[in-house]
Structures are given as C-alpha cells and as structure tokens.
Image (spheres, helix red, strand yellow):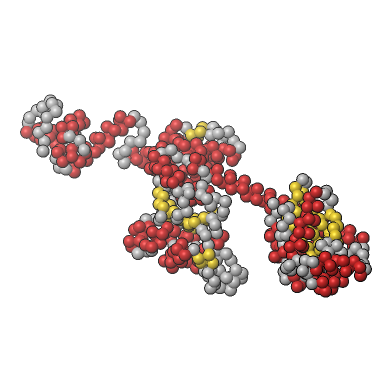
Amino acid sequence: MINFEELKHIHVIRKLQSILRSWFNTEIFFIDDRGNLRNLETMGNPSEWKNGLAALYVRDPGKPHFLEFLNQANEEAVRGDRKSFIRKGPSGLESVMVTRISQGNEFYGTVQAFSHLEKSLDPELRAKGRRVVEAWGVDGVLFEQEVAQLRVLSEGERKYLGELLELVAEEIVTYHSEISKRQARIEALSSELGSRYAYSNMIGKSKPMQSLYGVLEKIKTTDSTVLINGENGTGKELIAKAVHYNSVRNQNPFVTVNCSAFNENLLDSELFGHVKGSFTGAVKDKKGLFEVAHKGTLFLDEIGDMSPTMQVKLLRVLQEGTLTPVGGTEQRAVDVRVLAATNKDLKAMVESGSFREDLYYRINVINIVVPPLRDRKEDIPILVDHFLGRACKERNTPLKQLSKRALEKIFDYPWPGNIRELENEIERLMVLVGDEKLVPPDLLSPRIRDFGEQARVQGVRVAGKLKDALEELEVSMIKEGLKRTGWNKSRLAKELGISRAGLIIKVDKYGLDKRKLARLAQEGEQPLAKTGTDSGNS
C-alpha cells in the first residue's frame, strides 16, 4: 500500500503538481485504492487554489458530493485498463482527467486533475449545471463565476495534460517500489540480526553461561533498564545486542556510544544533540543519540567513566523521558530503552561518592554479570572451533585445527583479555599457519606458549600425568604448612581440611618429617620403622 502522506516530500512530484496548477489551472487529487481522498490536508488553503471550482466543491455542504464523484471516477479506473481517461465533473459541465496509479496487476488508486472544459458552454448548459449544484446547497452565483474561470483545452493540450499526469503516477509507483525494496531490505537485515544475536546462537555451554542465558530469557518481554557487568573483552556489547534483538523493540534502532571516548562537553552534544550556534562549530541543528534511538535501544558502554554532571542529565532523561539539546530551551520527549555496561565496581564508586546512588539504582533494575573466560574454561574448545571456522570461511580456505598440545596450552592460559584476546590469537594463528591444516604449539604467542613453563618453575605442574601433579602439589602444600605452623600437625591438618592421622600418614609417605629424623640422629637413636604413629608436636 502506498504511503500517500510521504509524497509531499518528493521533489519531482511537488514540481509536477506545481506545473499542472500553473499551466492548466487544475488541482491534483490523490485517491487511494479504497476511494479515499489522501492529499487534501497537504494542498494548503483552498482560497489559494488555482482552480476556484475545486475549492468551492470541497466546502461543506458540497464536499460529500465531491468526494463521491472522485470515488466513482476511481471505481471506473479499477474496472478499466486505460492509463488515462476523461470524465465529466459533478455538475456535468467540467471535465476531469483521471490517471491510474498501477504496476502490473496491482492497482493503488488514481491521480485526478480537476478541472477543465472541452468546449465553450452556452447559457442553457450553464443554467443546468447551476441547478445541479444548488440542489447540494452550493451558492449558484459563485458556481457560475468559477466555471467562467475554467480553461478550455484543445485536444493537444488534453493529451499533454494526460502525459504529465501519467508521469506523476509513474513517479509515485517508482517511489513506492524503492520504499518497498528498502523496507524489505531492512526487514531482511533485521531478521538476519535477530538470528545472529539469538540466544541459541550464543557460544558457551558452561554453568556460568547457562545461568546467564536464564536471565536473558526472563527479560525478553520487559522494557527495564539493564546494567551489564564484566571485564574488558567478555562480550558485553554482544550481550546488549542480544537483549535488544530479542525484545519488542527489535525493529527499531540499536545505538551504541562509548562514554569514555568523549569528554564531558562532546558527550553532552553526542547524547542530547545541540542547536545551531550553541557553540563554536555548531553550524546546524544536530539530533542526539537519544533521539536517534527513539523507540529503540541506547547502549551506554563504559558508563562508569561518565562525569557527575552527565550523570545528572542522564538521570533526568531516564526519569522524565525528556531532554533538552545543548543550547536549546525546548524539551523533547524520547522513548528509549537504556542498556549500560561497565568493567568497574559501580557499587564501590557509589560508596566513594564518584557515582550517583540514584542513577546507580535507576540503571541497575536488571543486573547481568558476564563471566570472564577463566571462569568458563570448558567453553574454550567451543570458542576456538567457532573462531577457526569463521576465519576459514572468510578466507575461503579448508578448515584448520589446533594440535592437541596447542589446545592444551590455550586451555592452561588464564586469558586476562578474555574472549577478545582469544579471538585475536586465533586470527594471528590463521595468518601464520599458511596452508598447513594443523596448527602447532610453536606458532602460539610467547605469553601463551611459555605460560606452562613459567607456572612449572613457580612449582605448579600443568602438563604430564595428573597423579604426579597432585602428589607434587600435596608435597608442596604440606612442606610449606609444616614450616608455617612450626611443625604443629594438629593445626596444619585443620587448615588442610584433613584428619591429623591422615596428615601423619602423608608426612611419612613423602618423608617430610626431617626435623624428627635430625633429632633422632643427634640423640644417637635409630629411627623406628614407619608404623603410622606420630611423636611430633601435637
């Protein structure tokens, strides 16, 4: 269906209407496929129309009869297949050019040029027409005056009038087609985005991620503000997009702004807009991101970096739904859902006075915590496969794989940069591996490749048999504990969470009671066989 209200903004249609009014003293009416007059409100004051008879007809009480006539002409256009035709007007004196707005088998309505004469009228015909309109309640004297102003068009002029009207109809159809294509593209992209950010497409099967999915599922139908907490690189913006594209606002804009990327003045203008001349460089009015995101979602990343002054302005918008542009005086209403994200402890900032408590509770209606990658290591193999598959698809190369040893080293690394760091590492490996199908561990970045060795030097084994690693850990913990507690086995057993007898068995097993052995040797006694008894400090 054509959006007739938008036609007033199309320059070529407005220009053609102006030409038709000037050359032929006609008024142009758009009637939709249901017979409704669609452009009367956009035509201006009837007293300024070129065609006074049209202005006279639209005034009550004649208006209902005029609308009925336009509808009848529309119905004739539906039934016929002529692009343009002439029909006698309401009084029977004037002639109206009617042009179909259609494309293929689709009929959208008509363009009607009202009105002209095909020949000069004699007094008898004038009188007959006057009697018709006077029966409607139209002033007969005014009617005759306006009929006298109608142009008598030659056959050639009528043909030219028809060609111009057909051009108007073609422009309307072209505009409608372009809008339909654009809307279809927008819907396709929106559907694609909705699929891309569907919760089912989010990567991670770990327990922390399952808890996150549960929260996301519960807030699908709400319009509450959401605060997303998480370290850098955990995917806070991805979560925000998922919230938006799974909400009722998913057909409207999703707008992002990083609050740490602007100083206070620039962020003020960026969020709330400004009016022309409000500051140096403000050469024209500019909408702020709140207005751009109207009916949609605004994602405020790094909100913990927002200045106290901006916090006050943001709180006002959230509470009242209105804003005032920089340099302006007029309040503007906005309907925006706000999602905020931070890697800072806002609660601690509230306690220190660097973040407003009222704003904190206003944005923290729903709280989402995105777990760091080190707390969801079971997701690492899934993420690696995802990044490898995507990179190979983008490069149109056969699928690569990480060697077992390379995957082990990736698994052992703590990933302080989280998913972003992992994604970048996989990107790096794809560049370095060349045509090889298997990615060896020596291609890993040094910090990842050497991390296990560094940890081993520090006394933690991350490779080899699990049994050996556990025994090494036990020996290290018991040895250090004995030194720390002054060889008080009862105290150490309590700290380690095992029985005293169990600790004594392990001390003897690993030969750690050097102090006892040294004392026995000094006293000239032979050590007793290991019997599970303990004569050390209690």
Residue 280 horizontal side relative to residue 62, left or right:
left
Residue 390 horizontal side relative to residue 480, left or right:
right
Q: Can residue 11 be seen in this view?
A: no
Residue 315, percent from left and from top: 44, 64
Q: Answer above or below: position of 468 versus 27.
A: above
Which of the 4 image quadrants contains residue 158? bottom right
Which of the 4 image quadrants contains residue 410? top left
Q: Residue at x 48, y 57 (%)?
A: 338
Q: Nearer the viewer, residue 131 or 498?
A: 131
Residue 367, percent from left and from top: 40, 52
Q: Answer above or below: position of 163 versus 23.
A: above
Residue 180, percent from left and from top: 68, 50
Q: Which residue is drawn at 38% across and 63% down?
A: 358
Q: Residue at x 36, y 41 (%)?
A: 454
Q: Which of 17 and 415 is in front in this view?
A: 17
In what quadrant of the picture does the C terminus appear? top left
Residue 486, percent from left and from top: 15, 42
Residue 321 horizontal side relative to residue 229, left or right:
right
The number of numbered badges drawn on the structure is 0
Q: Nearer the viewer, residue 458 or 246?
A: 246
Q: Residue at x 18, y 43 (%)?
A: 484
Q: Answer above or below: position of 107 versus 383.
A: below
Q: Is residue 478 visible?
A: yes
Which of the 4 image quadrants contains residue 381? top left
